[in-house]
Image (cartoon, helix red, strand yellow):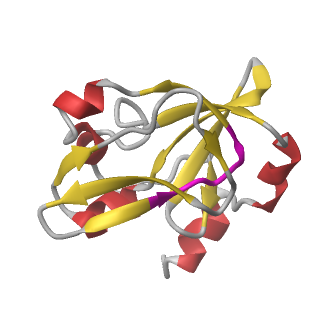
Amino acid sequence: MAQASYPDDLLYHPEHDWARIDAGDAEQATMGITWYAQDALGEVVFFDPPPVGTMLTKDASYAEVESVKAVSDVIAPLSGEIVEVNDALVENPAMINEDPYGEGWLVKVRLSDPSESEALLDAATYKAGLGG
């Protein structure tokens, strides 16, 4: 399992989801769940990705991850259309635990309103909200 970390290049949603705005294209973002979320869930055993083309709405659930302990909604930190899903997680959902910010990403999204990112938290603010 990954060590606790909250990379500074990510934006965080209070519901323990993250977004990485593409450095070369400010209208595209990669999304996933935070180290805190995967740690609270425990061993992730199932991820059923939404299909490419699905429209996400900021603050709304768009998928579920299932662990040995619970099923949890994944909340969209930003709105937009899914342009890619991490199909590798269907075969190996444990990558969410092993590398939540790298190989464990969930979806890539073409943002419908990039300015929504201004409402997300930076790493320091997110960590402070966790009590750490």
Residue 77: x %, y % from top left: 64, 54
Q: Residue reaching furthest bottom?
A: 131
Q: Residue at x 63, y 64 (%)?
A: 124
Q: Residue at x 43, y 38 (%)?
A: 106
Q: Residue at x 27, y 65 (%)?
A: 71
Is 81 drawn above or below residue 25 in the view shown?
below
Specify start and end residues of the magenta stretch as a single range: 74-80
Residue 19 lies left or right of residue 98; in this view the side is right
Is 12 drawn above or below residue 105 in the view shown?
below
Residue 91 lies left or right of residue 110; in this view the side is left
Query: Residue 109 lies in what quarter of the image?
Result: top right
Q: Residue reaching furthest top?
A: 24
Can see residue 109?
yes
Residue 98: x %, y % from top left: 24, 42
Residue 101: x %, y % from top left: 44, 40
Residue 89 or residue 99, whichever sits in front: 89
Figure label count: 0
Can see residue 1?
no
Residue 62: x %, y % from top left: 51, 51
Residue 76 part of the magenta segment? yes
